[in-house]
Image (cartoon, rainbow, N blue to C red):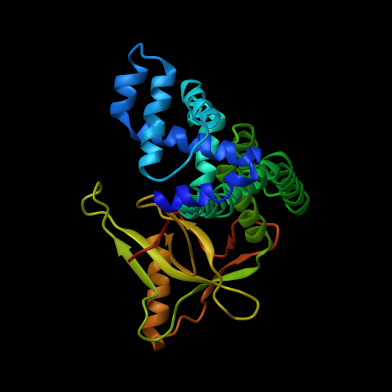
Amino acid sequence: MTSKHQRFMSNTTSSQPLDDVLLAMDVVDTLRHQEDILARELDASARKDKLIRRLREIYDAQGIKVPDHVLEEGVKALEEQRFVYTPPKPSLSVALAKAYIARDRWIKPVAGVIAALIVALGGYQFGIAGPAKARAAAERVQLTETLPADLERLRQAIETSTEDRQALILAETFYQDGIAAVAGEKARDARAAVKDLEQLQTDLALRYEVTIVSRPGEQSGVYRIPDNVPGGRNYYLIVEAIGPRGNALPVTIRSEEDQATKRVTRWGQRVPEAVYNQVRADKQDDQIVQDAVIGLKQPGQLEPLYTVETLGGAILEW
């Protein structure tokens, strides 16, 4: 403390106002650190000059000469709390200022959290929300434009290409199913109706011969004993649809046993016992069925026309 006061005293001879202020601040600082003086002098009703004399004794003991007006100014400044820092009252601006001052401590963690949120939001937007919105928009276009147009186009194409009554009934059924699905905003069902119409159009365009399988080592016919007809038998010729290029074509066949409908290249076509026995005898001669072609499917027809008697039923397994 002596060095501080000596520094101040080196400027007292200049009698500059700043020196007086500095001395007054020193006086106040001395008073604050002399709590016993404050307790005895300021809190009591003693005279101010008594306090000044006490302060002079303190400074004289340290070899410091302080003018009376500076002592008086220091005492006055202490009473007025002139050099006392009063913290501001809590407020939003104060909180923001403190947060700004302490930004080095919190800005990196907060920035990291914000970056993580941005990445997560971006991932959600581009990985989930964005594609979901795109799919919803695409489905809306399908329901309002694409699917109704496809249904109408396919129905008209089928009606133009055939006079087959069964085919026309199926086309209208598939079309109405699709329109109902569109109205109910069931895009999946509407697409299924479009596929049914496309398959019907493909089937109508096919040309093939229904040919009995007669290759050595392969069955040409089988029979079944129905569960509900003890002792009865159902006879089937094993056939395939052979296209113009000699290859087996997949066709839609419905089994009379379990009502399952599948696209197959080979099935069992039900025939009377007499036709079955005739084919069996033909194959037993040389293991080859001479008259293997028993039906012809022309474009525009849904079903083939058979050259032998058939009973309409079919099986898919034997």
Of 291 and 150, which appears nearest the observer? Answer: 150
Q: Position of residue 317 (x, y in %)?
A: 35, 64
**Would residue 140 be seen by someone viewing this image from the given angle?**
yes
Q: Position of residue 148 (x, y in %)?
A: 71, 41
Position of 66 with respect to 125 (left or right) is left
Name, please, the residue furthest toward the left.
230
Position above or below: 28 against 130: above
Position of 210 with respect to 232 (left or right) is right
Position of 153 with respect to 85 (left or right) is right
**Would residue 91 be seen by someone viewing this image from the given angle?**
no
Q: How many marks?
A: 0
Position above or below: 236 against 24: below
Position above or below: 52 against 228: above
Quarter assignment of residue 93: top right
Residue positioned 39% across, 62% down in the render: 316
Of 44 and 142, which appears nearest the observer? Answer: 44
Position above or below: 54 against 127: above
Q: Position of residue 279 (x, y in %)?
A: 42, 73
Q: Position of residue 22 (x, y in %)?
A: 55, 40
Residue positioned 34% across, 24% down in the render: 38
Quarter of the picture containing the C terminus is bottom left
Of 153 and 284, which appears nearest the observer? Answer: 153
Residue positioned 56% across, 43% down in the render: 189
Name, please, the residue furthest toward the top.
45
